[in-house]
Image: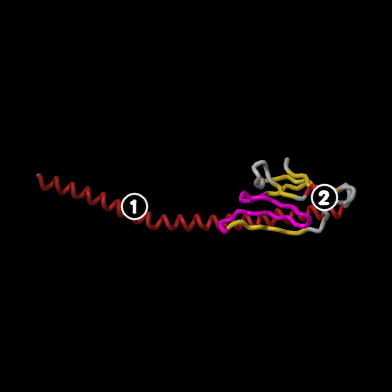
Amino acid sequence: MRWQTVNQQTRKGQAATEMLVTIGIILIFVVPILLLLLVGAQARFESLSHVQASSVVRIIADSINEVNIEGPQASKVIMVNIPTNAQYINITENEVVIRLETSSGPTDVATSFFGELNQSSVGLVTNENGVAPSGLYPMKFHAMDNGEVVIEHGG
């Protein structure tokens, strides 16, 4: 009788040890795979945000050029989709720049335009927190009587 009790306890201990070894082996294989998936997702996100930022700067520059070419009283309204990792949008006299925060540090995406920009439109596009707004963002462009383009943003 005593022999049977000891044998049952040994089997319970062996089953518990086997279960812990099985869980350990599963974790050894699953954790690196999950880490690889997370790293890959981050790289795809940064690539997608770079493409999105390129599209935004091109749309803004093309809108400035278009309104400038059409002349006085011309106007255009656009909606741009600003990436979530954008720090700011800087519109200078001849260039539109978006700075993105990436894992390798800040990255600038820029394009130039030839239209004449009113000095009041030159500067940073940021929200009340001092960072670029993310998501859909409205911008209105209109030409003054002297042909300079004025940008109104937000809304």
**Residue at 49% across, 56% down:** 37
Tell me which secondary structure the magenta stretch mostly adopts: strand
Q: Which of 24/60 is in front?
A: 60
Q: Percent x, y for residue 40? A: 52, 58
Dot 2, how many residues are within 10 Å of its Cα: few (below 14), some (14-19), or many (20+)? some
| Amino acid type for the residue under numbered disc 2 | Asn
**Residue at 76% across, 54% down:** 92
Which label's residue is closer to the chain start, 1 or 2?
A: 1
- Judged left or right of residue 11, residue 32 is right
Residue found at the far left of this picture:
1
| Range covered by the magenta-colored residues | 82-104
Residue that carries the numbered disc 2 in the rendered image: 118
Residue 92 among magenta residues: yes
Q: CA distance from mark 1 to mark 2?
A: 66 Å
Q: Which of 114/2 is in front?
A: 114
**Residue at 18% across, 47% down:** 9
